[in-house]
Image (cartoon, rainbow, N blue to C red):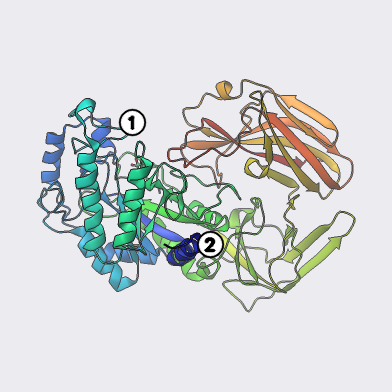
Amino acid sequence: MADSLDIVTESKSRMQWWKDAKFGMFIHWGVYSLLGKGEWVMYANKIPVKEYEKLAEEFNPTQFDAKAWVHCAKRAGMKYIVITAKHHDGFAMYHSRTDPFNIVDASPFGRDPLKELSEACREEGIRLCFYYSHVIDWHHPHALHDTFNNLWDYELEKKAFFRYWNHKAKGQVRELLTEYGPVGLLWFDTSGGLSKKESEAMVNMIRGLQPDCLINSRVSHWPDFGDYQSKGDNEIPMHGEETREWETPMTLNQSWGYSTKDQVWKSTDALIRKLVHIISKGGNLLLNVGPTETGIIPEKSTLRLEEVGEWLARNGEAVYGTSASPFPYELEWGAVTVKGDTLFLHVYNRYWPAEELVLNGVRNTVKKAYMLTDPSTCHHVHQSYQPETDHHEMRIRLPELPPEDHVSVIALELDGRIDVDQGFIQQANGAVKLDLVLSEITTGNGMNEARWTFKAASSGIYEVNLVNFKKSDAVWEQEYDHEVTVRAAGQTIACIPREDKVVSHSISCQHPYTEIHSSIGRIVIENPGTYALTLSSKLAKPKPFGPEIWQAAAVKLRSVRLVQAL
Ligand code: FHN
């Protein structure tokens, strides 16, 4: 029997390719693509199984070209593909011998797209991975989820879950692991209602068939399952929020499956910023495309992916195989990654500073600073230290205009292992951002108290704001039905937070959430130095227990942001 050290070592080496890869393609494709209303259309419109089977008879994606899809992923700089082998509609997108409701036996297409993809991926060195909806299955009479079941065809009382689980779910996972060569990763979803024992049985079966195949956390709703944490859809955590490896599944517009109506596309600029932002926090980005019923990835997606790929072709050194930013907070001008003794500063062009970039808290000496796309450049760096406040400041002289499209990367070669002040320190734009997840939280009487210490580099008047993520259907006044109190530097300010400012270009807040700032008041900092700050609010909650699949909270209080006003 392997001891726990062996298990950790095994998991680490199994994970290495995925950790280095950083960027993958998610593909939601199935019979539902015919209707162009997303992958939940069967449930939303209560389409009877018999009618849905007729739709399958019309599903004939003759333009599907596995090589073209794999090239598209490769050109985008993606290193792995996760495709829906079976989504919640129960239709297998491969030739399953376990259940005839599959693309070869139940549609006129007659080809096995997963076989073709596995060959194309092998030729191109891309890891092929499968999404499998193991609990929700609206086609099978005995599939049983804790919430989302087909109750328009079947009766809850007559369901015998084991009949679905042992035959279809386990049988199909076995097929995927035995007939398509090495599988990089099995991506499970929506496991509500699955027992711990059933979750363990699934994991053990996978480990027995392909020990190197990774498993995401959604294989179970019990904590600590799988090799890494799948964040909620479109969710980006704060620094330090995750103790495990993690990945954000993200839509290019607001839908997973093909949708004719949804035209809310993320721009290339936003996509590149989100990619480097996620990597700088230590995560992977799994970015989705929803091909059409004919088998084409929509042009709005391919164009954006190509542009991301062009950027990565020039700047990939600062992305692949890097590790997370050593700063315990978000930097407002961009993101940071690390490789060996080199620090990469990904400066968002929209925040390109005039003349110089100021970075606080780095204790190392910089040996050389250059633009990643032109290592022959050498930028002047001035470093200083204030012993009274233990404050390290670095000023990097920059060209007037950013040299790259979207995000320009500055490489800093340091004199040794990166050493950064781990406290919350004021950034060059005068802001100090205190994230809830890195506070000490005391709970009690409904009103919780979060506490931080921070370093102010200069004296002055500071505006105090709360940073919130508000869900589209949330009623603000129901969440903030109480006064919030902030105490710092011997002063107390209090108010009921309002929705004062909507941040439309938020980097970490995404659909269905919007970033809202609430002004709480002002505090005076008499002298530079270290201060304690406490925040009392019902919404100052500790990290929720267990995996969060559908992001649940109506309003998430993320941070307190101080910014020097005068
Ligand atoms: O219900 C699914 C949804 O259709 C989609 O597949 C996403 C992708 O992460 N997962 C579920 C909801 O979290």
Rendering quarter of residue 518: top right
Question: Where does label 1 land, which residue?
Answer: 147
Residue 483: x and y in percent read 69, 22
Task: Pick the quarter of the image with the C terminus.
Answer: top right
Out of 503 and 435, give the one closest to the viewer: 435
**As shown in the figure, which amino acid type bears the numbered disc 1?**
Thr
**Callout in the foreground (1, 2):** 1
Residue at 61% over, 77% down: 375
Q: Along the horizontal axis of the image, is 462 left or right of 233? A: right
Q: Along the horizontal axis of the image, is 320 left or right of 520? A: left
User: Which corner quadrant of the figure contains ligand 1?
Assistant: top left
Residue 21 in view here: no
Residue at 52% over, 65% down: 319
**As shown in the figure, which amino acid type bears the numbered disc 2?**
Asp
| Element marked by disc 1 | loop
Question: Where does label 2 land, which residue?
Answer: 405
**Mark 1 or 2, nearer chain start:** 1
Residues packed near mark 1 inside 10 Å, few (<14), some (14 to 19) or many (20 plus)? few
What is the number of the mark on residue 187? Answer: none
Residue at 21% over, 57% down: 175
Residue 470: x and y in percent read 54, 33
Rendering quarter of residue 417: bottom right
